Amino acid sequence: MHGNGPLWVITMRPQLPLPMRVEIIKVLLKAGANPNHENVHGRSARQVASTIANGLEDPFLEHEGDAV
């Protein structure tokens, strides 16, 4: 419908404590979730996490470093 993948959904889930969201993001990335998958509005979970910038971008940056 909106094209929001699991990473996008957990990134935008403020009801969960930040440390829990960070751990879930790490698990999803390790399992092969695409951090650059864009929804119908052209926004990826990585972009959203960077915009929020409250620590949610950290697992995306760590994953990026692991891929190098």
Image (cartoon, grey):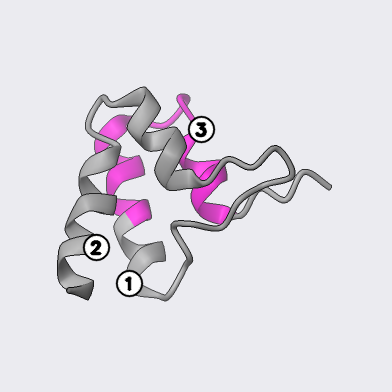
User: Is 7 one of the magenta-colored residues?
Assistant: yes
Of the pair 14 and 8, the residue shown nearer to us: 8
Q: Secondary structure at mark 2?
A: helix
The residue to which callout 3 is attached is 12
Mark 2 neighbour class, 10 Å CA radius: few under 14, some 14 to 19, many 20 or more: some
Which of label 2 and label 3 is nearer to you? 2
Mark 1 neighbour class, 10 Å CA radius: few under 14, some 14 to 19, many 20 or more: few
Amino acid carrying label 1: it is Lys
Residue 11 drawn above or below residue 32: above
Discs 1, 2 touching: Cβ within 8 Å: yes
Residue 3 drawn above or below residue 29: above
Q: Residues under labels 2 and 3: Cα distance?
A: 19 Å
Residue stretch in magenta: 6-25
Of the pair 51 and 4, the residue shown nearer to us: 51
Residue 62 sits in quarter: bottom left
Marker disc for residue 30: 1
Residue 49 point in image, percent of width and height: 38, 36
Residue 60 point in image, percent of width and height: 29, 52
Residue 56 point in image, percent of width and height: 29, 37
**On the picture, is 29 further left or further right than 38?**
left
Marker disc for residue 63: 2
Residue 64 point in image, percent of width and height: 24, 62
